[in-house]
Image (spheres, rainbow, N blue to C red):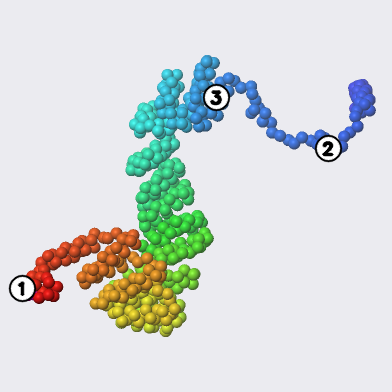
Amino acid sequence: MLPSTSRNFLRRVQPCKRRIAACQRRHLSQSAAAHPPQNPNSRADRPLPRQNDVGFQRTQTRTTAAQFTAALDRLSTQQAKFPDCLAIATQMKAAGIQPDLYVYNSLLRSAAEVGLGQEAWAIVEDMQASEVAPDKYSYLYLARAQRFRDSNFMWNVWDAQAASGIEPSIQTYSHILERFVLSDRLEFAIQFLHFMRTQGQEPELRAAQAMVIKAAKNGFPRLALDLLDSFEANTTRRLDHEAWMNCLISSAESLYAEGVARCWAVIVQELHLVPDEGLCLAVLHTAARNGLPDLATDALRVLKVIGCQWQEFHFAPVVESFVRAGRIKEAFTTLDIMRKSDIPPVPETSLPILHAISEDTQTIDNAWNLIEQMHKEGSPIDAAALNTIIQATSGIGDLQRAIGIYKSFEEYSIKPDIHTFNFLLEGCIAVGHRELGDRLLADLKEAKLKPDRETYINMVLLCLTQETYEDAFFYLEEMKTAKHKPPMLVYEAIIRRCLAAGDVRYQIAVDELKETGYQLSGSLRREIAMVTEEAKKQSQTQPNASVGLDGAAQRFIETGGLV
């Protein structure tokens, strides 16, 4: 470094040293006069959290036009705010602000919210007068505003949009589709859906779902599922559980087995939803009618899952589903499952089994072979199963075989119940075997079973099959003593039997029938009238007792025995 250079450097350094010293002195003087430091842990000395600088977004220094536009945008999406939007538009006009497309669309959207179709048309006309061209959203709001008016107004919007050269948006297509659905014009909705697809358009999810639900609620489950399939096949979107649930309800109400099986699999197995008891019962009925025991048992399982206590009417469809599927053995087993679940089977429960095995003796033999097979396998056999076979054999008049089945109850470790004796008594009525009926009644009492209403009815009818039917009145009184109300059937049978025998006690039965609260049927009234008329004719044609007597005899009668 040259000497001159070092001297110049020192000259520049000296002023800097003086300035630094002055700053140090000033700092020391300020520190002496300063307040003592606060607690370093106090909240006031903590550094403020870092915040984004977004204050410019909340600035209030907007232009008048921007303020009007913001107010319109806020009010246009609210219900019943159209008058407020018009007031803002009036203020804009007074301020000399020319509305733009956004302002007009906000007004149209507000009118569409409350369905003011005529006012929406007026806004569009004002747009055209102001040389503001409507866009696709303008026509969408205009179409929505016409939803409470006749469909001609909606098609006027369609024509106006086509004339302007603007292609309808998918929202416009979907709105028209929803309009058809809401007005319950499902056939027009299907036709318009076909037109949409010719234009390469698919409806929005909401419109497609509304269409599927409408078809399901109108009782067209097959159509609803076809629409659902076509929509999901043409798009990547999937309808939610509401559409599937409505399809299941409609299919179950229509007993549409294919639809029920498919919707049940989607709802229960895929979506893991739980139907309610009413829907499960409808599914059980469909499974019973179409012979789908797997579906029926799964519906029974769901009832258990939702905490519904099993009842007889839950098991009856399961029994019928097994019968219609040709699985009589499983139907017999279901009767035992019912009893183990503290749900005793009633005769109506096994009615499908009865209808299936009552065709002829061969079907009864097949049913009995199944009972023997179950006994050999060690499977439990319920008394209702044997009662059903007894009822079937009694129905075809084979009373001897029915008695044989009755006597075999001990072999299967089964005790006969009241239904067993009632079915046997029905067989006795069919052949008029009064003595056997009396023995069965004695066995019933020996088994310590209490006769029920059906037992008394059968005994009355059995007595009426005999030439001497006095005991029928006895069992009628026994029935009333046991607090059982005699049915109309009993009174009609007694009246007809008395009429056939010329027994005037039919009138007593008629009076008691009316006192019980029944009304004579038309056929029985005609029978009584015919018998009464015939009795009158016979009394008129019979000669008087005095005719044909000779003079002496006549005098004997007239004088009271004095000749």
**Which of the two residues, 384 or 135, is positioned nearer the viewer here?**
384
Image x and y of residue 425, in percent? 33, 76
Q: Which mark is residue 42?
A: 2
Q: On the rendered image, what quadrant is the C terminus found in?
A: bottom left
Report if residue 216 is visible in the image: yes
Q: Quadrant of residue 176?
A: top left
* Disc with the residue nearer the chain's start (3 vs 2): 2
Q: CA distance from mark 1 to mark 2?
A: 150 Å
The residue to which callout 3 is attached is 69
Task: Give me the residue at 43% from left, 76% from top.
Answer: 449
Q: Amino acid at mark 1?
A: Gly
Going from N to C along the chain, the mark reached first, 1 or 2, is 2
Residue at disc 1, secondary structure: helix
Please tell me in which quadrant of the rendered image residue 348 appears.
bottom left
Cβ–Cβ below 8 Å for labels 1 and 2? no
Badge 3 element: helix
Magenta portion: prevailing SS class: helix
In front: label 1 or label 3: 1
Stretch in magenta: 549-553
* Image coords of residue 19 (percent x, y): 91, 23
Image location of residue 289, percent across then percent down: 36, 62
Q: Is residue 407 above or below residue 330?
A: below
User: Helix or strand or loop: what does disc 2 sit on?
Assistant: loop
Quadrant in the picture for the N terminus: top right
Horizontally, residue 139 falls left or right of residue 531, namely right
> Given the image, on which type of amino acid does mark 2 rest?
Ser
Label 3 sits on what residue type? Thr
**Nearest the camera: 250 or 57?**
250
In the image, residue 550 lies in the stretch drawn in magenta: yes
Residue 551's disc number: 1
Instruction: Give percent across and percent down for residue 431.
Output: 27, 77
